Amino acid sequence: MAHRAHRIPWRSLTSHLTHRAPTHTSPNTTIANLHFRFLPTQAQDLGHFATSFARALNEDTTAARRLYAPKYLPRARGELLLDDRLAARIHPLAFPWHHSRSDESRQHIQKTQQLCQHVDGTTDFACGCPLPYTERRAAPFLRPYQWNGCFRFAEVNGDEFFNLQVVSTLFMLGKMEIIFRLCAHPEIGLKEWMRVQDCICIPLAAFDHGWGPVFDAALEMYLVLNTFSCFPELHPSSSASWYADGNGGYVPDYRATRMYQRPVHEWTDVSKATEMSRYPHRQFLGLAPRFDYASRDPFYEECRAMDEEGRRARLKRLWEQDEGVSVDALLAVVDEAKEEDCFTYGELPFTLFLTSDTAGFCPSKEDTARVEAYLRERGVPDDWVTEMTTLREGNEPRSRLPVPHDPLHERNRTQLRRYLHHCWQIMVRCNMLARELGTEINWARQVVEALEKLVSCPPGMKLPKYRYDDSEELKQYTLQGESKEVSDAIRARDEE
């Protein structure tokens, strides 16, 4: 059953979706995905789903805010914001954040497991510690966002962005009281940091440095997994009966769809923008960053034209392979291309989608415990055992899934339920922050935009149409049904 099914009408969404398998007969039929059906009631039903989703989230936000004091006094600039206990939880995550700072600023940062002892330090990052003691005070969190020219974000806003990563971590840990105290300060600039472009040359959607991607990621993964939970025929456990019935070739699998592969890639891949927006999703899925996926979506359109007919033939052969075929056999088909093939999400079998030379599945805590017990039985000293099973660079998380790479597997049910709850709580916390800053997140609009990004439409059709109302500075999202009439609309003010 989908998460919060008693408050969110998932059926209003899923009844308008259908799975389409790739046929490879033309360039437009090589992608497996869920498609909108464009039935006559689609606009009203999707509008009902989006507004119900927003209502449930806003109600939970109001209830969650009541758990804290109505008002907070601002912190003094020199007051310690992060105590040692909290800093110890954040410290292992901090080293990668320095990659978003300028080359000169980050080159002297040292990897160390100890908290910064430079209590009397007065220069921000001069001590070289991943999480300097000076950065645990209130003052660094009050650094304002500054406009920067092209390719100068790290130089101009690198230090400010570092502290935004700390704020994003506080979201994950649920430390909202600290955030509320920050918001009470008149110099706080978190409102401007909700959406931040790298520069005017790069679209915001492609490289957002703000804290908005924290809830973007949570929303997309929440929608994807809840939606596919309503399609049991797409679960890998159904593949056995598929083969038992004498079928071959393409096996219906939610993990082979564009709707699943795109957000899994986007929200686990390494990024200089909002690294912490990816952290909980890597932790749940067990996928390390720097994952070199076979899919190369940004160059898809220009690359596929080089040998489209041959590329489609190779894709068809990939899907016609027998069950359990090795990854090497699949790669051999891809390697037949004279020029390197380029694939987009939803074109490759899931096993090939995960192919990487540099990263793989991170073992679960249970797996690690078994290895540690085995090593101790063989007389390996405890300090060696700990060193051998310590996480890799950046303290990357262990997986929470007993069955790797299949979040919807029955044995993963408990972990999935916790993860979906965590995604929901992240959205609630972001919503609380937005309200505290005097702005709002239009969740109905966010849902529509996420679905537009994830679910496919028939050629020549679009889910919403947009119209900007200059008089009220509002954008109207008109959801379309079969009739293409104005049948349901969401009015939203652009995020500031």
Image (cartoon, rainbow, N blue to C red):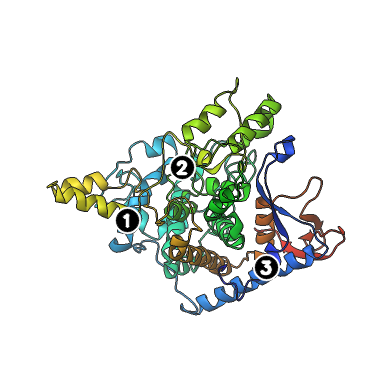
Q: Position of residue 237 (x, y in %)?
A: 52, 55
* The N terminus lies in quadrant: bottom right
Q: Say if mark 1 contacts mark 2, CB within 8 Å.
A: no
Secondary structure type for disc 3: helix
Residue positioned 60% across, 38% down in the render: 319
Identify which amino acid the numbered label 1 is placed on: Lys
**Within-10-Å neighbours for mark 3: few <14, some 14–19, many 20+:** some
Q: Say if mark 1 contacts mark 3, CB within 8 Å.
A: no
Q: CA distance from mark 1 to mark 3?
A: 36 Å
Q: Position of residue 79 (x, y in %)?
A: 35, 64
Q: Is residue 397 left or right of residue 65?
A: left
> Which of the two labelled residues, at mark 3 and mark 2, occupies the earlier sequence position?
3
Q: Is residue 269 left or right of residue 224?
A: left
**Within-10-Å neighbours for mark 1: few <14, some 14–19, many 20+:** some
Write down the residue under mark 1.
365
Q: Is residue 84 left or right of residue 344?
A: left
Q: CA distance from mark 3 to mark 2?
A: 42 Å
Identify which amino acid the numbered label 3 is placed on: Arg
Q: Which of the two discs, 1 and 2, sits closer to the camera?
A: 1
Secondary structure type for disc 1: helix
Write down the residue under mark 3.
11
Q: Which of the two discs, 3 and 2, sits closer to the camera?
A: 3
**Residue 172 - label:** none
Write down the residue under mark 2.
100
